[in-house]
Structure formats: structure tokens, C-alpha cells
Image (tube, grey):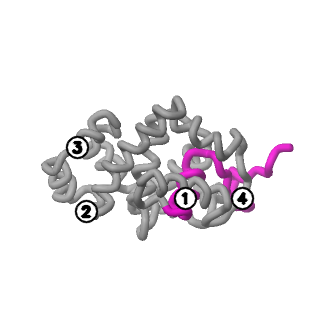
Amino acid sequence: MEDKIRCKWCNLKNPKYIEYHDNEWCRPAFDEKYLFEMLILESFQAGLSWECVLNKREAFKKAYDNFNIEKIIKYDENKEKELRDNKNIIRNKLKIKASINNAKIFKEISNEYGSFYNYLKTYTKDKTYYENNTTSPLSDEISKNLIKRGMKFVGSTIIYSYLQAIGVIYSHDSECFLYKKEEN
């Protein structure tokens, strides 16, 4: 495992990061619960490193009822305070409020399209994009629509990271052992 060359961003001293890089990042995963979890986690990344969020992922799962959207959309002021007081997660008041708001909009989109992935496919056309940027016309377009629908902390950079996380955008460095080119 140690002799493999990985993407430059992967902290080789952090087993969670290596595990995420090797077995999750850029791999297609379109299960509704996973899509929701990653959208919530990516929104907490705004202004922080992904490693910071990843290190707190298990605490987020516990604090957010294992990302059960039906419970999260019903969170009230008492639950918001509980989350703000939870030292194991990122306690940014605006991000916590946004996560609850975004859960409601995620559910509305899922209901409208049959699933959140069906919504994403209206933009992606079920295609995998092979690129390594921080934003793209695709992330710009999805971000604008989500913001128009009322979501917060879903700027183009966050959405680009989200699309990488769920495997719509494949971005492993050319030196990385997981690198592959676009298939024709």
C-alpha cells in the first residue's frame, strides 16, 4: 500500500484519507443516501480542507442521524443548538442551518425527478467527465440551479468537489496508480 503513488493531495500519514482516496473518491456511487451524505459533507467543506471534514465524518454520521433525510428535514431549533454545541463536528451556525435547508430541497428535487441522481443526469447525460479542475461549466450550471432552488454552500467549487466525490468527474492525477483516461 505504501509503495503506490497517489494523488498529490492525499495525506499519506492519514489512513482515513488513503482509504477514501483508494476506495471511494471518483468512483461512481449514485445511491440516494450516499448522494445526500456527500452533499451535506461537501457543503461543510466550504473554506476548509476535505481532510478536516473526512476526519469528522463518523461524528457527522452520528450527529446527523446517519444522514437520515426524513429526520434531518424535521430538525428544529433545539437540534440546531445540539449540533452547534457538538465539539466533534464543524459547528458553523450558517452551515448547520444550510444543511437542514438543503436536506429539504434535496428531498424536493428527488421527489420532482424520481431521485437526485435523475436530477443530476439532466446535466451530466449519465456521462463521466475526465478532468482535474476546481470548477467547470457543468459544476457552474448545477450550482446555479441549486442556488436558484434555495440551497446554500453549493457554489461551483463545492459542486465540482461533490461531482468528483460521487464519481461523475474522474480526477486522479496522471501519476496516481488509479489514473485512467477517458474511454472512447
Mark 4 lies on a secondary structure that is: loop
Q: Amino acid at mark 2?
A: Lys
Disc 2 designates what residue?
Answer: 93
Which stretch did the figure color magenta?
155-184
For the stretch drawn in magenta, the main secondary structure is loop
Q: Nearer the viewer, mark 4 or mark 3?
A: 3
Write the residue at 72% across / 43% down: 127
**Cα–Cα gap, marks 1 and 3:** 26 Å
Mark 2 crowdedness (10 Å alpha carbons): few <14, some 14-19, many ≥20: some
Q: Position of residue 49 (x, y in %)?
A: 45, 66
Q: Residues within 10 Å of mark 1 (few under 14, many from 20)?
A: some
Amino acid type of the residue that numbered disc 3 sits on in the rendered structure: Tyr
Task: Read off the residue under disc 1.
Answer: 144
What distance separates the C-alpha of mark 2 from that of mark 1?
A: 23 Å
Kindly identify which numbered label has been placed on residue 131. Answer: 4
Discs 2/4, front: 2
